[in-house]
């Protein structure tokens, strides 16, 4: 299944760091020489939307790790929450490999597996939240 680029990046950004790094390592020999454009940590503003008024506001700042790599005319990008430059670099490697049509099946399989894990985690979290819901009409 072909996913939009933004969805792939979102899935990779939420992937477990260890799994992402292990998979990214397998792509390095296939990609060959790459140019690291950026590998840094920084703060970004966290945008939120007020559900009552519908207005946007910034909740605060979030520490992120960011990586950008280049191979020829193609660029790979990774940004992840926290201070894990290796995971951000691995994310950029996967992005670059997919754009370069290298290890495409492996990359799509990895992204699909991560999406299934994330969906299961989200379902569990929603069930836990639902268990704490109080129906005020019963009081």
Image (cartoon, rainbow, N blue to C red):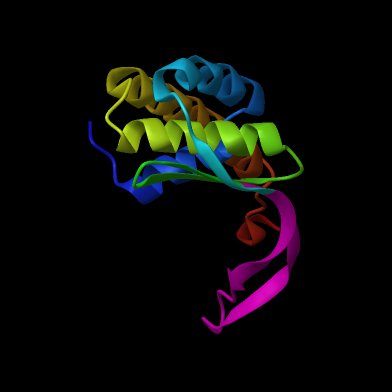
84 lies left or right of 112: right
- Tell me the residue at 74%/57% (across/down): 42
The part of the image, by quadrant, that contains residue 121 is top right
- Tell me the residue at 74%/61% (across/down): 43
In the figure, 72 relative to 58: above or below?
above
Q: Position of residue 48 (x, y in %)?
A: 60, 70
Circle count: 0
* Span highlighted in magenta in the image: 40-66
Front position in the image: 52 or 101: 101
Front position in the image: 2 or 34: 34
Inspect this view and state whether residue 121 appears.
yes
The part of the image, by quadrant, that contains residue 130 is top right
Q: Position of residue 58 (x, y in %)?
A: 67, 75
Q: Residue furthest left?
A: 1
Chief secondary structure of the magenta span? strand
Residue 118 lies in the magenta stretch: no
Q: Quadrant of the N terminus?
A: top left
């Amino acid at each position: 299944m072909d996913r939009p680029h933004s969805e792939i990046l979102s899935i990779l950004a939420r992937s477990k760091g260890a799994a992402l790094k292990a998979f990214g390592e397998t792509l390095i020999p296939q990609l060959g020489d790459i140019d690291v454009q950026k590998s840094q940590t920084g703060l970004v503003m966290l945008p939120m939307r007020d559900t009552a008024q519908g207005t946007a506001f910034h909740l605060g700042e979030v520490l992120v790790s960011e990586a950008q790599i280049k191979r020829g005319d193609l660029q790979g990008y990774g940004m992840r929450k926290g201070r894990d430059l290796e995971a951000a670099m691995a994310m950029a490697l996967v992005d670059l490999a997919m754009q370069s049509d290298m290890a495409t099946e492996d990359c799509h399989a990895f992204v699909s597996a991560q999406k299934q894990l994330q969906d299961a985690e989200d379902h569990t979290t929603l069930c836990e939240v639902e268990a704490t819901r109080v129906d005020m009409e019963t009081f």
